[in-house]
Image (tube, rainbow, N blue to C red):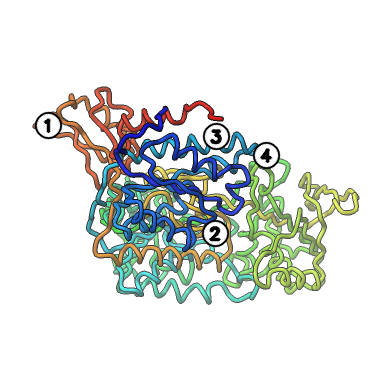
Amino acid sequence: MPSPENKKPKKRIGVFVCHCGKNIAETVDVERVAKTIKEEYPDVVFSTDNHYLCSEPGQKEIQDAIRGKNLESFICACCSPSMHEATFRSLAEKSGLNPYQVEIANIREQCSWVHSDIKEGTEKAIKIVGTKVEKVAENESLTPISVDVNKDCLVIGGGITGIQAALDLADAGYKVTIVERAPYIGGHMAQLSVTFPTLDCSQCILSPKTSAVAHHKNIELITTAEVVNVSGFVGNFSVDIKKTPRYVDSDLCNICGECEKACPVIVPSEYDGGIGPRKAIYLPFAQAVPSTYVLDADNCLGIHPLVCSKCKDVCEQNAINYDMQPEIITRTFGVIIVATGYDLYNINKIPEYAFGPDVDVIDSLQFERMLYVGGPTNGKVLRPSDHKKPETVVFVQCVGSRDPEHHMAYCSKICCTYTGKHAMLMKKKDPNAEVYVFYIDIRAAGRGYEEFIQRAQEMGVVYIRGKPSKIFRDGDKTKLWVANTLTGERLEVEADLVVLAPAIVPSKGTKELANVLKASLDEYGFYKESHMKLRPVESYIQGILIAGVALSPKDIPESVAQGSAAASKAMTILAKPKLEHEPIVATVNSEVCVGCKVCQGLCPYDALSFDNENNVSVVNEVLCEGCGTCVSACPTGALSLKNYSTDQLEKMIKAALRTETT
């Protein structure tokens, strides 16, 4: 342990310990922390405590101490660096100090919040601050790395979130490329009949936006495509996009429909949830963008080798081309926005619920397609098994949601409200129909949502609190066993049609795309934001933004808002003439490096290359994120991380292992 002997400090260090109201002071004796650090570390020439360091008076105290005590560096013992590191670095710069001579000792989240005993909390806080004193004493003054900015943006996903983000950016003058896996844009919103709580036509409010995307001079739309590789860094991402052929030339196709009439293959339509048919060559729906037919090679009788050419034979425009091949399109972008949307939970994973049109048990999206006037039943609600009008319709909520033991623990957020919409529309179509909703709790958070549920109840929809234990077929009826959890009564309900509201889950391919982007996912497979409250659309990778249901279940207004939020964040990056990259990066001592290349295979950012002429590894500082993986793996110690030298780390460890003082 350093002794408080009278020797000239190597660096004049100041320490400022924050009370953070009672957040820290309740379980940490902050005055003692400040006093002990001053006594034990000769380099600390000034140490004090403050109730709120982030406040204007708190920042002024730091500024005054820098000037009055000639501080060369300082430590703020406070909350997480993700909260206020930028604040105090900016303060240092204004006061004439290099920003990298500032360290944050996290004594809130890592200390006070996890302790109840003030003695233990105080001792731990002293150790944490001590490690930062040892570190900052040998910190170098660093300069951020300057990089150029590509002004184009990539939006992955063409649902309403991605569309909104793309339009905002394009309207601001930036070039945008939308990559969509499906043959059309619009996502699940394009499948809806009407939207809650206003019951306005989904296509009526969506079509103007999809049309704007199709005709916007600043938007490039690539459908039937997916992102397969991403390299580079914020401001300069290199992206490989794999485009699957449509086998139809969109410039030549005049949407006459003759090819569809000639096609002999009939398969279930994904757009209609499988309850309606489509051909192997088809236009997804009337308002589809791009407004072009697409050939489904997986269901075609055969292209390689060619088995059937009936669609091509009748195409007077010669728009059908069987020789189209998959292609890799490479583009460079400054920012990437991920808006990949969602899928529905696989109900077949719930064996106690019979599911399928043959037993008249369907999911919510299939019911939406029935309600839509242009859908497979022309807007009529019919039993799939015999196409008769149902007299009793039962809606079941939380199918796979809020079930931590067997399925998804989280609430899917929108099911209560859209089930209310479904029940209301069913009552409007047939006032004499018996309509029941089984629910666990009603969660209708949103402007006008609670009143919307009340409207459904006033129309005669019967809400029963209880979750069915079993759904099964009995003759020509579907039966549900359920307990009313309010009355304790056991019920057996006969239904002509059962509509399930499945959990919302991440879209197919989310995990693979996250690996490509090097983005983080939560325990349920949704993307994780950098900070839930302060950086709600930013990922941990700078320049990669995430919005909409790719993050978590949400409704259309919230998805649109997040699309605009992501676009706004993207503009703050794209508008800059140059970007600054964090200078805490790995460096190579060429005299020690033996050219083993172990580091190259371990770097998650592809920041290491090899100089064959000199037989040494080389760090691309712009790509390096300072994770330290290469440093820890280097067998010769040739690699080091700026401001995290071996000497610094050893001294920090010793400070953390300090013995308790009295």
Separation of residues labelled 1 and 2 (CA atoms) = 60 Å
171 and 640: which is toward the camera: 640
Separation of residues labelled 3 and 4 (CA atoms) = 43 Å
Q: Earlier in the sequence, mark 4 or mark 1?
A: 4
Report the residue at 67% width, 39% height from top: 406
Instruction: Say which of marks 4 and 1 sits in front.
Output: 1
Q: Earlier in the sequence, mark 3 or mark 1?
A: 3
Residue annotated with mark 4: 406
Q: Secondary structure at mark 1?
A: loop
Q: Quadrant of the C terminus?
A: top right
Report the residue at 33% width, 62% height from top: 573
Q: Secondary structure at mark 4?
A: loop
Rendered position, 284 above or below 306: below
Q: Earlier in the sequence, mark 3 or mark 4?
A: 3
Report the residue at 31% width, 29% height from top: 646
Separation of residues labelled 4 and 2 (CA atoms) = 33 Å
Separation of residues labelled 3 and 1 (CA atoms) = 51 Å
Residue with the most extreme left position: 613
Residue annotated with mark 3: 123
Instruction: Say which of marks 3 and 2 sits in front.
Output: 3
Residue annotated with mark 2: 277
Q: Earlier in the sequence, mark 3 or mark 2?
A: 3
Separation of residues labelled 3 and 2 (CA atoms) = 70 Å
Separation of residues labelled 4 and 1 (CA atoms) = 55 Å
Q: Residue 79, percent across and down?
A: 50, 49
300 and 615: which is toward the camera: 615
Q: Residue 361, percent across and down?
A: 70, 53
Are there few (<14), some (14-19), or many (20+) residues within 10 Å of tag 1?
A: few
Q: Amino acid at mark 2?
A: Pro
Instruction: Say which of marks 4 and 2 sits in front.
Output: 4
Instruction: Say which of marks 1 and 2 sits in front.
Output: 1
Q: Secondary structure at mark 3?
A: helix
